[in-house]
Image: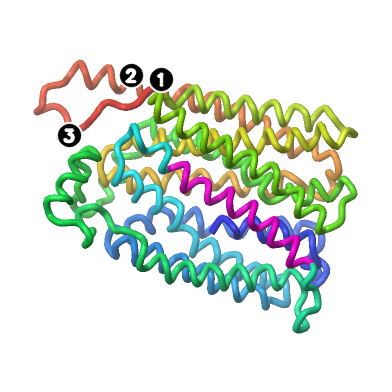
Amino acid sequence: MYGSSVNIANALTMNLPKDLGLVNMQQNIALTIFFVPYILFEIPSNLLMKRFRPHVWLSGCIGAFGIVMLAQGFVSSYSGLLTTRCFLGLAEAGVFPGSFYLISIWYKREESQQRFTLYWCSVLVASAFGGLLASAIAKMDGICGLSNWQWVFILEGIMTILISIAAFFLVSDFPEEAKWLTEEERRFVIARAGGNAKSQPITSRDVVAFFQDFKNIFGGIMYLTLVIPVYSFAYFTPTIIKTYGYSTVQTQLRTVPPVAAALVLCLITAYLSDRSRLRTPFIAFGLSLAIAGLAILITVHHAFSAKYAGICLISMGTFSAGAVIVCWYIMNLQGHTERSIGSAWMIGFGNAGGIVATFSFLAKDAPLYQTGYSICMGAMCVCAFAAFAYGVLAWRGNKRFKAGMAPETQPRKRVLLQIW
């Protein structure tokens, strides 16, 4: 699904701008329109997933995404591109938060980071595979009378539709609804994961109570500021590399190593984080790598090797820190109600950073892109502050919880928050 950002980024380095007559800010607007429905429908989507069951809702969203992606391969105008991008955002709105919500219900906190990271790494696999696939598809220009960028959307749309069919049969529902478990096994899984049995329907009062807790606000800010460089480099890494003088195929191939390096670091970080039962040291390490990479890109203007190393550091830092931030926040939420609202809030509000990202790297700023790099640097600094503030508020919440431990004054089955 994250391929929507990868394939549009690759298509923009092909003939898409010329064939559709995109000028001035139209490329950036086409990227931005995706996020409007994506942000607005995150929370409603999670509520609908509880009603229709995960295997139905998630596979349906993936299937709808694939159909629209396929249709995008046949657009012939700027307005058609905007329309398909908007519907892609609507279809994708339910997948990321819904998947994280589902994972959080099945696993214990101390084993969750590796599971969250494996799913998070689908983003990296999509990026690497998308770059390799695009380098091959770039040579398909003119086949069956279609441009190479059209084949990018058509082939990836077909693959997504096939994946949605498999997802309908392979995606599990919540433990209490999983038909492949016995009743005794369901009770065991629910108790093992912290007693997160499916609760009554979520009301507006639940939503209001959720946003009265400032920890949740900082959780959204953490993800928002992380997403700005993530989407910036997902969308514009091919464009940035192409300014170094490479052909379209060479550009696509050079987008793969930064992603591969990030994938390796993510998997190592997940293992060490679960083993140590720590989150914040790995967040700090990832943010430090990203800041170092941005500093290189801001200050080095001629040495390609140094700038390429900076791109690798940014990719490694943002993706490794991002997986830990998402897991840290969502696994600190309590029960179905908080996790349903919280996972959608974090991903939905956070993806507003994608809107910032689409206007951070403008053609007029090429090839130095000082404005875009500076925006990403500022976002990383704010992310670090938000993570620190969230940890402090979690510590204060635990302190108050311990002070009033009487059963009648605390929600049933509530557990202490992970601070570090």
Query: Which mark sits nearer the N-terminus, 1 or 3?
Result: 1
**Which residue bears the numbered disc 2?**
396
* Dot 1 crowding, Cα within 10 Å, few <14, some 14–19, many 20+: some
**Mark 1 residue element:** helix
Judging depth in this view, the residue of 40 and 8 nearest the camera is 8
Q: Give yes or no for residue 131 being in the magenta stretch.
A: yes
**Which residue bears the numbered disc 3?**
413
Q: CA distance from mark 1 to mark 3?
A: 23 Å
338 with respect to 307 (left or right): left
**Cβ–Cβ below 8 Å for labels 1 and 2?**
yes
95 with respect to 9 (left or right): left
Q: Does 275 sit above or below residue 323?
A: above
> Quadrant location of residue 360?
top right
**Which residue bears the numbered disc 1?**
392
Q: The disc labelled 3 sits on which kind of residue?
A: Lys
Q: Does 337 sit above or below residue 21?
A: above
Tell me residue 286's x, y (percent).
58, 29
Secondary structure mainly formed by the magenta segment:
helix
